[in-house]
Image: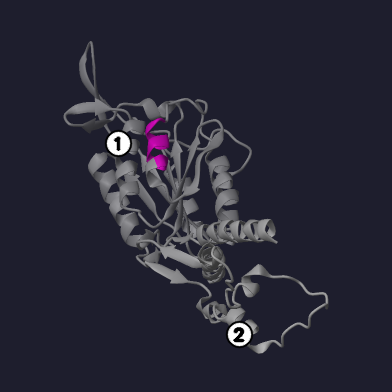
Amino acid sequence: MIQFAWPWLALALPLPWLLRRLLPPVSAGSERLRVPFLDELATVQSSHAGKGQQRSVPRLRLLLAVLAWILLVLAAMRPQWIGEPVSLPGSGRDIMLAVDISGSMQTEDFVWNGRPIDRLTAAKLVASRFLERRKGDRVGLILFGTHAYLQAPLSFDLESVRRMLMRAIVGAAGPETAIGDAIGLAIRHLKDRPEGDRVLILMTDGRNTAGNVDPLEAARMAARFGIRIHTIGIGADEVVIQDFFGGRRINPSTDLDEKTLREIAKITGGRYFRGRDLEELEKIYDLIDQMEPVQQDERTWRPLHALFPWPLALSLLLGTLVLLDWRRRA
């Protein structure tokens, strides 16, 4: 639909006619500004055989001048085309995912569709489903090993974040685990966001073995900025290894520092979860969904497209034609 930003300017439409009717006539011989538009409002004169042609030209000029004025006023009223309503993302939470991609994440102690998969693949599968349910939230991605990197900044574009996660490779950030640095990097990107909606979900299978920041000190700093940290310890408690002497059971998660992860969550008001298989990981993210529900406040926006350049350009074109014709006949 079309609307006018300043419809009251339509009152200017009869202005030239009012000026012609109300202003006193200019005395002969006095200097005056010749305005062809107002002059053409006078009676058209004719006095000889060619008077029909003389009468038609000024009347055409008058018609073009009137049309130019109407278009000029129309442009001044600022016509706008209002488009269809467009839904905007709700003002949800700011969630940062920090995923461990250190060397130990290649351990194949998860099962998917009857075949073994490594820990990072399991994390990708579950976290990508979690992202699909977070419409309305800003989500970012941190990948960490020996170093921590911001892979995707906070964004409503959850599909881009998911693609970044699916491209993560074990060992790309180094073989060790810098949990403290990952938390510190998340703080840097969350601390200026609205209070009460800052969340970090940290997933790891080990203990802090690298980096410059102590994990507990980083957690205390996060708590000062009102950032909740939910920690997830990933990895099976028991797998069967086949060797020359048959099968033997081992614990592949001996390096998992559950004590520190629990303390990080406790300091920041979050929770610690243990993910031993895909089913448990799914339940963990379901619980996080319940603890951090998506805000459903939906807003709509109707795009506006300005239309005034069209009548303005046409008015200037007609005005130029009237002026050129008047100067040629003057």
Q: Is residue 18 above or below residue 112?
A: below
Q: Residue at x 75, y 82 (%)?
A: 26
Instruction: Tell me the distance, in whole angstroms, between the alpha carbons under discs 2 and 1.
Output: 92 Å
> In what element is the residue under mark 2?
helix
Q: Position of residue 186 (x, y in %)?
A: 54, 47
166 vs 55, nearest the viewer = 55
Q: Residue at x 54, y 66 (%)?
A: 51
Mark 1 Cα shell of 10 Å, populated few (<14), some (14-19), many (≥20):
some
Q: Position of residue 17 (x, y in %)?
A: 58, 81
192 vs 48, nearest the viewer = 48
Residue furthest to the left: 114
Amino acid of disc 2? Leu
In primary-sequence order, the first of circles 2 and 1 is 2
> Could you tell me if residue 39 is visible in this image?
yes
Q: Residue at x 42, y 47 (%)?
A: 157
From the viewer's perspective, tell me whether residue 327 is left or right of residue 195: right
Amino acid of disc 1? Asp
From the viewer's perspective, tell me whether residue 35 is left or right of residue 118: right
Residue 239 part of the magenta segment = no
Residue bearing the label numbered 1: 237
Residue 165 part of the magenta segment = yes
> In what element is the residue under mark 1?
loop
Q: Report the span colored magenta.
A: 160-167
291 vs 322, nearest the viewer = 322
Q: Position of residue 48 (x, y in %)?
A: 57, 68
Residue furthest to the right: 30
Mark 2 Cα shell of 10 Å, populated few (<14), some (14-19), many (≥20):
few
From the viewer's perspective, tell me whether residue 77 is left or right of residue 35: left
Report the disc number at residue 18: 2
